[in-house]
Image: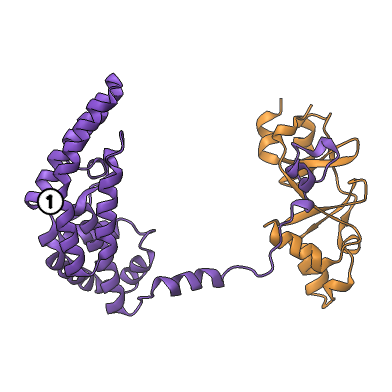
Chain colours: A orange, B purple
């Protein structure tokens, strides 16, 4: 089972927030990506700085007029707190990501970094 | 006895030593490092600036007052050790009083130094450190005039060098440059951050941090 003390803080936004606000959240928290959640804090998708660049800026769209849920990457893989570091490590290897959102009863509670999963897997 | 700080990190008192000190601290003196890398011939200018500083300030280094101050520090450290070993604060303060008296000539010299060079803040710092060092256990707080002057020589060299090569900026301009790079309208985003420590308590990051 994954321990909460091994998790990192996670930045999130609501799906109905506009992309201008999303970009400001990323700037203010010095982050490169954030998780989009619903009212129950269930993860819906993920938005990275690259998404904003490729799906808004380069296509000359107005960030204020686009909602986060319209540009997010959907169907993201999460892991439950009851799962193992080994499983988290395998998923991150498959997806080639550096972190994975962790949920408790489907509610977002943090991020597990690749290095931590690598170190603590059995 | 020299200041503890002199034993831990000795400062230069020759022009060559000052140049060496500045070039050995490329992060602290990054603008000088950049100038020297771009134009190695400016190293001679740096040496000349250091020589000027040494000529200006060397007369305030060492001397009878400094020797007496060092002897006083030795008594002060002994008094601190006495207090630590025996808990005898009255005896310790007696020893420290001798130290305080021994610092008087150097503090008078620092006033003269301040008036002649215009470095009044250095003089004030020297006197205040001497007073603070009377507190039991704080003999090390008094670095002595010589060390303050050595620091001044380094600052003076840096300033004169930057003026010579045209890169000098007063501290207000340096501060303005730093602030220029900051983003505007940055907000606290605790409500957009989930802290795993509080995530199980059904509170937002902001609520959790306030509770």
Q: Position of residue B123 (x, y in %)?
A: 24, 59
Q: Position of residue A95 (x, y in %)?
A: 79, 46
Residue B74: quadrant of the picture = top left
Q: Position of residue B71 (x, y in %)?
A: 12, 39
Q: Residue at x 49, y 73 (%)?
A: B177
Residue B43: quadrant of the picture = bottom left
Q: Secondary structure at mark 1?
A: helix
| Residue B184 visible in the shown view | yes
Q: Is residue B121 left or right of residue A58?
A: left
Q: Is residue A98 above or below residue B80?
A: below
Name the subunit of mark 1.
B
Residue closest to the far front:
B90
Q: Residue at x 80, y 32 (%)?
A: A87
All told, the count of numbered labels is 1
Q: Is residue A51 left or right of residue B136?
A: right
Residue B161: quadrant of the picture = bottom left
Residue nearest the observer in this picture, B32 or B105? B105
Q: Residue at x 22, y 73 (%)?
A: B45
Q: Is residue A16 left or right of residue B197?
A: right
Q: Position of residue A77 (x, y in %)?
A: 85, 44
Residue nearest the observer in this picture, B121 or B58? B121
- Badge 1 density bin: few <14, some 14–19, many ≥20, Cα 10 Å: some
Residue closest to the far left:
B64
Q: Is residue B160 left or right of residue B28?
A: left
Q: Is residue A110 above or below residue B123?
A: above
| Residue B81 visible in the shown view | no
From the image, which quarter does the C terminus of chain B lie in?
Answer: top right
Which residue bears the numbered disc 1? B105
From the image, which quarter does the N terminus of chain B lie in?
Answer: top left
């Amino acid at each position: 089972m994954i321990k909460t003390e091994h998790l990192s803080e996670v930045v999130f936004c609501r799906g109905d927030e506009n992309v201008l606000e999303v970009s400001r959240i990323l700037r203010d928290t010095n982050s490169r990506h954030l998780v989009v959640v619903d009212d129950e804090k269930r993860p819906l998708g993920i938005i990275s700085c690259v998404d904003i660049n490729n799906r808004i800026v380069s296509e000359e769209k107005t960030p204020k007029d686009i909602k986060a849920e319209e540009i997010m990457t959907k169907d993201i893989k999460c892991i439950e707190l009851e799962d193992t570091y080994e499983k988290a490590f395998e998923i991150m290897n498959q997806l080639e990501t550096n972190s994975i959102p962790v949920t408790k009863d489907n509610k977002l509670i943090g991020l597990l970094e690749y290095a931590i999963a690598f170190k603590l897997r059995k | 006895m020299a200041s503890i700080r002199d034993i831990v990190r000795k400062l230069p008192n020759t022009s060559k030593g000052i140049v060496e000190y500045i070039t050995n601290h490329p992060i602290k003196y990054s603008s000088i490092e950049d100038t020297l890398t771009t134009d190695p011939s400016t190293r001679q200018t740096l040496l000349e600036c250091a020589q000027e500083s040494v000529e200006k300030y060397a007369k305030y280094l060492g001397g009878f007052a400094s020797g007496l101050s060092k002897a006083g520090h030795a008594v002060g450290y002994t008094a601190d050790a006495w207090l630590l070993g025996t808990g005898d604060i009255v005896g310790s303060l007696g020893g420290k009083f001798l130290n305080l008296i021994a610092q008087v000539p150097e503090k008078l010299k620092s006033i003269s130094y301040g008036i002649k060079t215009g470095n009044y803040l250095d003089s004030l710092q020297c006197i205040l450190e001497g007073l603070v060092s009377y507190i039991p256990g704080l003999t090390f707080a008094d670095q002595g005039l010589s060390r303050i002057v050595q620091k001044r020589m380094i600052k003076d060299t840096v300033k004169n060098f930057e003026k010579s090569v045209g890169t000098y900026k007063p501290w207000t301009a340096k501060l303005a440059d730093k602030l220029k790079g900051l983003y505007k309208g940055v907000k606290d985003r605790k409500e957009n951050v989930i802290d795993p420590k509080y995530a199980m308590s059904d509170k937002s990051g902001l609520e959790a941090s306030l509770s």
